[in-house]
Image (cartoon, helix red, strand yellow):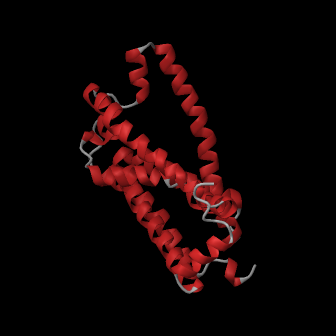
Amino acid sequence: MSSAASFSVWDYVVFSLMLVISAGIGVYYAFAGRGQSSSADFLVGGRSMTAVPVALSLTASFMSAITVLGTPVEVYQYGANFILICFSYVLMVAVSSEIFLPIFYRLGITSTYEYLEMRYNKVLRLFGTVLFIIQTVLYTGLVIYAPALALNQVTGIDLWGAVISTGVVCTLYCTLGGLKAVVWTDVFQVGIMLAGLLAVIVQSVLLQGGISTIISDSTQGGRLNLWE
């Protein structure tokens, strides 16, 4: 494998630190934090989390490996009309925040499935829960496999080794630290992801000789087909 397709020492340092810090956050909230005295503390953070870390955590949840690795490929293959999906996200956020969330908040429930039971019956709640579990298992498999495959390609790390190490660390901080550990780990990880994305953008602009060159190449290649 050529040096252009392999990790340097600093790459390994950053990767290792990310895993260690993520696990450390879970350990902190499990032992040093002393804030997991009840199920409410563990599952909903004692309902004391502020808006900014929760918002960043939600952002990290949507920025999976599928987003980071898959979206650039989608845009490269089919063009910029992929960005139209952002309009549906704006509508979804507005409707969810102004219609659904106030109802859930006033009822004091922790999931939409509780509402299904309150509004309809327990059978419908179980049906919705089972569907979500199936979808999550399939989705999680893809989310873990994608970065593991990328690591395998650039580092030579065994594919199953990457899958297991990622899964163990994520399970560790989720299990030990509860929601607070999940939220603050997401805050840390979204910072890493944004820094990486920014580095790629800056390096791309420098290599191509400016944003205008990139736009010109994209236009000539038919990639700015926003309304096609």
- Residue that protrudes farthest toward the front in the picture: 227
The answer to whether residue 120 is above or below residue 159 is above
Which of the 4 quarters of the picture holds residue 158? bottom right
Residue at x 69%, y 56% (from the top left corner): 160
In the visual, does 199 lie left or right of 53?
A: right
- Residue that protrudes farthest toward the right in the picture: 1
Residue 62: x percent and y percent?
A: 49, 50
Observer able to see residue 33? no
In the visual, does 103 lie left or right of 227?
A: left
Residue 92: x percent and y percent?
A: 43, 40
Q: How many marks?
A: 0
Residue at x 38%, y 37% (from the top left corner): 96
Report the front residue among 220 and 82: 220
The answer to whether residue 53 is above or below residue 109 is below
Residue 108: x percent and y percent?
A: 28, 28
Report the front residue among 219 and 179: 219
Residue at x 63%, y 46% (from the top left corner): 141
The answer to whether residue 174 is above or below residue 187 is above
Report the front residue among 228 and 170: 228
The answer to whether residue 106 is above or below residue 42 is above
Observer able to see residue 4? yes
Q: Quadrant of the N terminus?
A: bottom right
Report the front residue among 196 and 42: 196
Residue at x 64%, y 49% (from the top left corner): 142
Q: Quadrant of the C terminus?
A: bottom right
Residue 148: x percent and y percent?
A: 64, 59
